């Protein structure tokens, strides 16, 4: 047992002494990042009708993720340069501007430029929210704060596409971006009020431009891999992108102005093992969310709505598990992290077997295992990493948590896309290609899951 289980307090204690508005602000920031990342999943056909540019559909997500990853990785340093309050207010305004650009876009390129700004803005928002957690909440409250953040993220993965779908069904896809612009504006106004008294800018702070530039190259290679027409090219770009990410770690470890904590590249440390596990497990999970719906529609005749409900079971299980292990159960945090990692590995065994032809109950079991994996482990992994950070690295190390996960999501999306295309998915959606993809996207992710589980066990070896 670690400090995660010590001094456990109630939700009432967490929200007392004026912490409720600040807690709500952090949850809103996480919601903006997670929901806006996925809102285009259900509106892009409508966008295509109005703006054209069908060939650029993937960039509605890829451009967002590139911006979000770069922003999340730099959030700790940016908060030091501008001060947390100012930086958070500006990130909300940038998000609102990006949403307004997409909402009012006269062409697809303006729309996509807005998506990149949304990625930058919400990436900084989520990074600054993590910094705010470290600054505003005593250690005894961290398990519940992270459980709530995990729950919000899980709910957002379900509601983001649903909100977009509701607007698209009403014939007003632009309205969803005006809605997010209003939320981002409200976030900025609330941050200006609630973050008074947080640390102001540091005179010695600077931004590590070299590492950010190399990171942009690596993330860009992974994003482009998701769009490549040939699987071999996709896999090559993914491999090159991952090698560049390793180079970033090596450069950063020797740099005077660092982007990440010094232990980030050391798997023998809590921080290094934690980051590695977050990246790998997230990457391994992406196949179901991306390819589950078309596989279910093709092989089982489900409507898009019903296929979406099946995928949504993962999000519901994530949220339920996150709240289940709060309170007295927090003292077993190491056990929950390990069980969560093993649940993810198990889901990659169940899903490829179940999707093609087994009863729906088995598919739901696989989805539940996948959701439970993150519900049990997400908050405790984040807390362990935060607790292991030195005071000088607390801001950059905490803000990087979201960026590490989103980098894993981008890599996993590209990897599953390459696997699906390798078995003919890109040539046309048929029962044969859907059946082949139902195996390929999980098999290719299995090594990521196994190594990620190993890293999770290393993260908790003292627990």
Image (tube, helix red, strand yellow):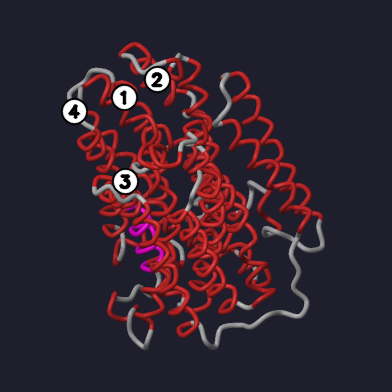
In screen coordinates, is 286 left or right of 266? left
The answer to if 163 sits in the magenta stretch is no
| Position of 5 relative to 364 (above/below) | below
- Counting residues from the start of the chain, the first of labels 1 and 2 encountered is 1
Q: Which residues are magenta?
A: 144-154
**What SS does tag 2 mark?**
helix
Numbered disc in front, either 1 or 4: 1
The residue singled out by tag 4 in the image is 360
Give the image location of residue 401, x and y in percent.
Answer: 54, 57
Mark linked to residue 372: 3
The answer to if 151 sits in the magenta stretch is yes
The residue lying furthest to the front in this view is 106
Alpha carbons under labels 1 and 4: distance apart: 13 Å
SS assignment for the magenta stretch, majority: helix
The residue singled out by tag 2 in the image is 437
Alpha carbons under labels 2 and 4: distance apart: 18 Å
Alpha carbons under labels 3 and 1: distance apart: 22 Å
Give the image location of residue 124, x and y in percent.
Answer: 56, 63
- Counting residues from the start of the chain, the first of labels 2 and 4 encountered is 4
Give the image location of residue 315, x and y in percent.
Answer: 30, 47
State yes or no: discs 2 and 4 in contact (Cβ < 8 Å).
no
**What SS does tag 3 mark?**
helix
Q: Identify the image quadrant of residue 27.
A: bottom left
State yes or no: discs 1 and 2 in contact (Cβ < 8 Å).
yes
**What SS does tag 4 mark?**
helix
- Counting residues from the start of the chain, the first of labels 3 and 2 encountered is 3
- Counting residues from the start of the chain, the first of labels 3 and 1 encountered is 1
- Is the residue marked by circle 2 packed among few (<14), some (14-19), or many (20+) residues within 10 Å? many
Q: Is residue 405 visible?
A: no
- Is the residue marked by circle 4 packed among few (<14), some (14-19), or many (20+) residues within 10 Å? some
């Amino acid at each position: 047992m670690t400090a995660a289980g010590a001094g456990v307090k109630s939700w009432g204690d967490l929200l007392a002494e004026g912490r409720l508005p600040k807690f709500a602000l952090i949850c809103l920031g996480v919601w903006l990042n997670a929901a806006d990342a996925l809102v285009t999943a259900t509106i892009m056909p409508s966008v295509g009708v109005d703006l054209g540019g069908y060939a650029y559909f993937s960039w509605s997500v890829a451009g967002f993720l590139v911006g979000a990853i770069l922003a999340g990785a730099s959030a700790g340093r940016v908060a030091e340069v501008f001060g947390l309050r100012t930086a958070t207010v500006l990130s909300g305004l940038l998000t609102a501007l990006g949403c307004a650009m997409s909402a009012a876009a006269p062409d697809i390129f303006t729309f996509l430029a807005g998506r990149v700004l949304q990625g930058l803005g919400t990436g900084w928002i989520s990074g600054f929210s993590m910094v705010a957690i470290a600054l505003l909440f005593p250690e005894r409250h961290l398990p519940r704060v992270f459980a709530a953040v995990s729950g919000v993220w899980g709910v957002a993965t379900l509601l983001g596409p649903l909100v977009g779908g509701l607007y698209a069904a009403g014939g007003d896809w632009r309205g969803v971006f005006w809605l997010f612009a209003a939320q981002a504006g409200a976030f900025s106004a609330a941050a200006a009020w609630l973050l008074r008294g947080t640390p102001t800018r540091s005179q010695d702070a600077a931004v590590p431009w070299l590492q950010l530039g190399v990171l942009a190259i690596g993330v860009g290679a992974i994003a482009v891999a998701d769009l490549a027409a040939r699987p071999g090219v996709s896999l090559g770009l993914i491999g090159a992108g991952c090698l560049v990410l390793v180079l970033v770690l090596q450069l950063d470890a020797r740099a005077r102005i660092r982007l990440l904590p010094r232990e980030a590249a050391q798997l023998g440390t809590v921080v290094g093992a934690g980051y590695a596990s977050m990246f790998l497990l997230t990457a391994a999970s992406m196949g179901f969310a991306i390819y589950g719906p078309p596989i279910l529609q093709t092989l089982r005749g489900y409507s898009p709505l019903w296929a979406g409900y099946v995928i949504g079971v993962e999000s519901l299980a994530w949220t339920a598990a996150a709240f289940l292990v709060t309170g007295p159960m927090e003292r077993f945090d190491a056990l929950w992290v390990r069980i969560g990692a093993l649940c993810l590995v198990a889901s990659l065994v169940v899903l490829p077997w179940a999707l093609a032809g087994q009863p729906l109950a088995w598919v739901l079991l696989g989805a539940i295992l996948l959701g439970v994996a993150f519900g049990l482990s997400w908050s405790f992994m984040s807390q362990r990493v935060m607790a292991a950070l030195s005071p000088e690295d607390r801001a950059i190390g905490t803000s990087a948590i979201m960026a590490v996960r989103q980098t894993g999501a981008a890599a996993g999306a590209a990897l599953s896309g390459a696997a699906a295309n390798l078995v003919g998915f890109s040539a046309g959606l048929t029962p044969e290609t859907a059946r082949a993809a139902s195996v390929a996207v999980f098999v290719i992710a299995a090594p990521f899951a196994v190594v990620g589980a190993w890293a999770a066990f290393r993260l908790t070896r003292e627990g």
